[in-house]
Amino acid sequence: MENVRSARADAGGDVGSDLSEQIKAATKANHVRAENTELMLSYQKGRISLTQYKLLLCSLYEIYKALEEELDRNAAHPAVAPIYFPQELARVESLERDLQHFFGSDWRRKLIVPAATHRYQQRLRQIGKENPELLVAHAYTRYLGDLSGGQVLGKITQKSLGLSSKEGLLFFSFPGVSSPNRFKQLYRSRMNSVELTEGQRAAVLEEAVSAFELNIQVFDDLQKMLNATAGTAAPPRSNAAGLLSSPIVQFAVGACVALATVGMGMYVL
Ligand code: HEM
């Protein structure tokens, strides 16, 4: 709660009574922190590798699967109904196709996610069951982010990885949204129409701060996995050279080392 109070103060006290304005002000400092994670900085410098992107897609898939299943289940809830836009926003199918593109038809068996991704998923499942109004904070954090900086990240991914078509990049594409800016305005007005008690509103603001922090923890865990993977990618010296030089094996070995190093969980569907 302190975080939200100080964020309001940081915003200069001129934040109106609209939820969309309050949530932006409450998460301003967290947004800056998210932008400055090592993973997001690599992105902004145009230095995203295929391994980084594939690992990020695995976590995004697990996060959106939990988020969208909980939104679907609570679609008729009075706080969720106004911000429920599955046609325009749903990401799970796009992520499935991107994962299939990079990992092949048995992609489900190859998903690797760190412990922070599990914690994020668990939080989404918990609030979906206990406090569905808090889903507003999570939907805001991910979808409005995807429609804002996320659009730039899509272009950087395409350029950095030299991808010529949309294959592997569907996550960034919103065919049901012709103008991201206009859609964001609509989304904000729908958020503002959600009826919340003072207590619920404070809880939504607090949850938005947590949502950013969960994302930051995922990025940090992914970066640790990547750093450890890079550490294991040294030139092989044994008879297993051929096997170890395979990018997939390097990725798997590195990920296992990373998981052990940073105490993460490995999740295979
Ligand atoms: C490289 C990293 C990032 C960059 C460059 C970036 C950039 C931006 C930009 C330019 C906007 C538009 C601001 C506006 O329209 O007023 C924005 C909005 C937003 N971003 Fe990011 N962003 C990044 C990472 C993130 C992350 C990791 C998240 C959350 C997971 C996030 C969530 C949001 C949200 C929720 C908004 C909407 C703010 C609002 O209008 O209420 N961003 N971002």
Image (cartoon, rainbow, N blue to C red):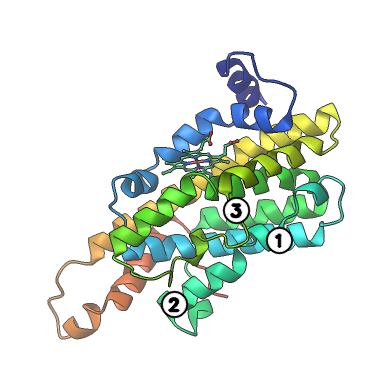
Q: Quadrant of the C terminus?
A: bottom right
User: In front of the other: label 1 or label 2?
Assistant: 1
Query: Residue at label 2?
Result: 101
Q: Does the residue labelled 3 lie within 8 Å of ligand 1?
A: no
Q: How far apart are marks 1 and 2 (CA)?
A: 23 Å
Local secondary structure at mark 1: helix
Mark 1, Cα crowd under 10 Å, few <14 / some 14-19 / many 20+, is few
Local secondary structure at mark 3: helix
Q: In which quarter of the image is the N terminus?
A: top right
Instruction: Give the residue type that dot 1 points to.
Output: Pro
Q: Can residue 1 be seen in this view?
A: yes
Query: Residue at label 3?
Result: 119
Instruction: Give the residue type that dot 3 points to.
Output: Arg
Q: Distance between the residues labelled 3 and 1?
A: 24 Å
Local secondary structure at mark 2: helix
Instruction: Give the residue type that dot 2 points to.
Output: His
